[in-house]
Image (tube, rainbow, N blue to C red):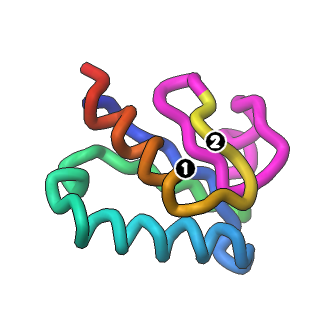
């Protein structure tokens, strides 16, 4: 498994929804809690966020690979975690 990076704004309703999905996913798949998850608040770490190619939050990356960005459903967030879990 490799580290997932999530770029977000705390006040963004889509980011809040993604985090709600994460908690649901962790309850349904407790093994995914083992995936290293780096959460980057764009309000505090703008320079780091600028190094990645995305326009909308939330944005999930596996290394430099963008998995998804913007308002997504739970299945899309789950797919990001599944991909990290299956990647060595």
Label 2 residue SS: strand
Label 1 residue SS: helix
Q: Do the residues labelled 1 and 2 touch (CB within 8 Å)?
A: yes
Q: For the point 66% across and 40% down, which residue is it?
A: 48
Spot occupied by residue 33 in the image (x, y as percentages of width and height): 22, 57
Q: For the point 65% across and 48% down, which residue is it?
A: 59
Spot occupied by residue 70 in the image (x, y as percentages of width and height): 74, 54
Task: Give the quarter of the figure containing the N terminus.
Answer: top left
Q: Pick the residue in front: 68 or 7.
A: 68
* Residue 42 located left or right of residue 26: right
Residue identifier under label 1: 76
Residue identifier under label 2: 68
61 is within the stretch colored magenta:
yes
Tell me which segment is drawn in magenta. Answer: 45-65
Say above or below: 52 vs 15.
above
- Residue density around tag 1, few if under 14, some if 14–19, many if 20 or more, within 10 Å: some
- Residue density around tag 2, few if under 14, some if 14–19, many if 20 or more, within 10 Å: many
């Amino acid at each position: 498994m490799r580290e997932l990076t999530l770029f977000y704004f705390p006040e963004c309703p889509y980011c809040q929804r993604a985090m709600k999905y994460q908690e649901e996913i962790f309850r349904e798949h407790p093994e995914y809690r083992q995936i290293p998850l780096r959460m980057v608040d764009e309000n505090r770490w703008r320079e780091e966020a600028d190094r990645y190619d995305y326009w909308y939050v939330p944005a999930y990356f596996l290394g430099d690979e963008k998995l998804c960005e913007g308002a997504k459903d739970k299945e899309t967030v789950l797919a990001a975690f599944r991909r990290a879990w299956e990647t060595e």
